[in-house]
Amino acid sequence: MVDSARALINDFNELQSFALLRRALDPALGAPDASWARGVLLLGQTLLQKNQREEAVSWLRWALRRSPTLQADSVTSTPALVTALQEARAFVAASGTEPRVSLRFEWATATTSGGFGDLRVARGAGDASGPVQLSVNGAFLDEGRPLRLSPGSYRVAARASGQSDAEFTTEVLPGVTTMVTITFVTASVGGSRAVEPLRPTFPPAVEPLRPTLPPAVVPKASKGRSKLWAVAAGVAGVGIVAVLAMPKSAPGPTTGGIVLRLP
């Protein structure tokens, strides 16, 4: 199929080559070998030449998740393909992985370029029947019901009671149904699975703010007045001591005269 698609492209019949190339990439046909890698690169390069970059990048991201060692030869590949593959590799590395998620892809019997794909998300068969909240790019998603989307990468989030949120990125491809299975391992109590229903979470109780009164302030004496009293007390004390230390003199004459006393 890849060789037939190459012959169609050489005859300038790219539109018919898309169906062959996408059918050749079906994982059900076998492991991602060298022929599969050639088909991925040829499909991506042809889509880029037809200005269908979004679909081309979606295929490259999807292929890198299956075969991280995929490389484009800079000699036989166009610069646009080499750049797109590098950007796709960086995107896949940044999006990370989720070990609780398994993917399976169902190919349609016939697909056309520019078509839509389906995304279906469900829990594993052994999981409890408690409620699960699903969303894709922030929008609500029904569990088990296919959602038709244009080709691209989508962020899926799943939340179940008693479990940490599961978030992962997957690609939706034209004519392909992406089957996502999430396995939540719930704790067992008494041999049976204990699953609590989802409850809304509220912030903790907040006590009302109360005004805080300042501590009582005891009035203090003026510093200037305190110093004045201290000086006065000191002068008085010195005066008393000087008077007591003054020697007593004999009584003067009773006749008239002037008596001088020196300290």
Image (cartoon, grey):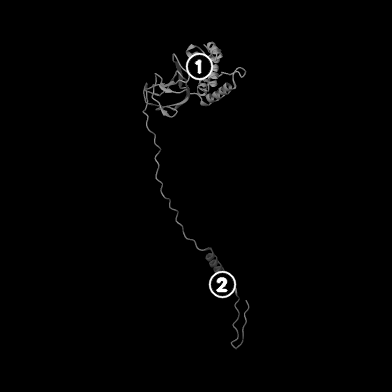
Place of residue 71 in the rendered image (x, y in percent of width and height, measured from the top left): 58, 18
Front residue of this view, candidates 9 and 107: 9
Q: Circle 2 is placed at which residue position?
A: 240
Which of the two labelled residues, at mark 1 and mark 2, occupies the earlier sequence position? 1
Callout 2 amino acid: Ile
Q: Is residue 254 left or right of residue 183?
A: right
Q: What number is the disc on residue 165?
A: none
Place of residue 77 in the rendered image (x, y in percent of width and height, measured from the top left): 59, 18
Front residue of this view, candidates 201 and 158: 158
Q: Residue at x 50, y 14 (%)?
A: 16
Packing grade of label 1 (10 A; few <14, some 14-19, many >=20) is: some
Q: Circle 1 is placed at which residue position?
A: 15
Q: Quadrant of residue 166?
A: top left
Q: Residue at x 47, y 13 (%)?
A: 28
253 over 168 or under it: above or below? below
The quadrant in which the C terminus is found is bottom right
- Secondary structure at numbered mark 1: helix
Q: Nearer the viewer, mark 1 or mark 2?
A: 1
Packing grade of label 2 (10 A; few <14, some 14-19, many >=20) is: few
Residue 83: tell me if it is visible: yes
238 over 188 or under it: above or below? below
